Image (cartoon, rainbow, N blue to C red):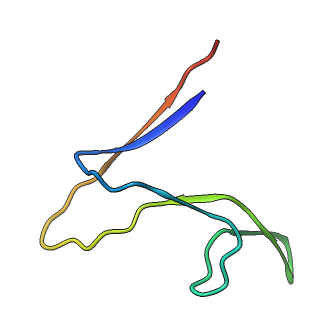
Amino acid sequence: RVTIAMQGVSIAPQLVKGREDPPLGWISRSFDAKVASPTLCWQETIRGNTKRVTILQIEIA
């Protein structure tokens, strides 16, 4: 089980795969070839100095 969270914010992440506009969630392993790939992202407006900490927790059963 894998858990990912951003410390100190209540913003939920989005899972994006193969979005065209704006381009997000793609991988290219060779020239002129792209494949949709799951990408996790958070989006927010920030002002001034901002620090974000991402916590990735992996539980092995």
Q: Is residue 18 above or below residue 59?
A: below
The residue at 57%/85% (across/down) is: 22
Instruction: Give the x, y percent position of residue 29.
Output: 83, 67
The residue at 56%/20% (across/down) is: 59
Q: Specify whether 45 is left or right of 24.
A: left
Q: Nearer the viewer, residue 39 or 12?
A: 12
Instruction: Give the x, y percent position of residue 33.
Output: 87, 78
Q: Specify whether 17 is left or right of 15.
A: right
Q: Specify whether 15 is left or right of 35.
A: left
Where is residue 5, by image quadrant?
top left
Task: Single out the residue that lies furthest toward the top.
Answer: 61
Q: Nearer the viewer, residue 51 or 41?
A: 41
Q: Is residue 21 above or below residue 11?
A: below
Q: Is residue 23 above or below residue 29?
A: below
The residue at 28%/53% (across/down) is: 52
Instruction: Give the x, y percent position of residue 14.
Output: 51, 60
Q: Nearer the viewer, residue 20 or 34?
A: 20
Q: From the image, which quarter does the N terminus lie in?
A: top right
Instruction: Give the x, y percent position of residue 45.
Output: 26, 74
The residue at 25%/51% (across/down) is: 9
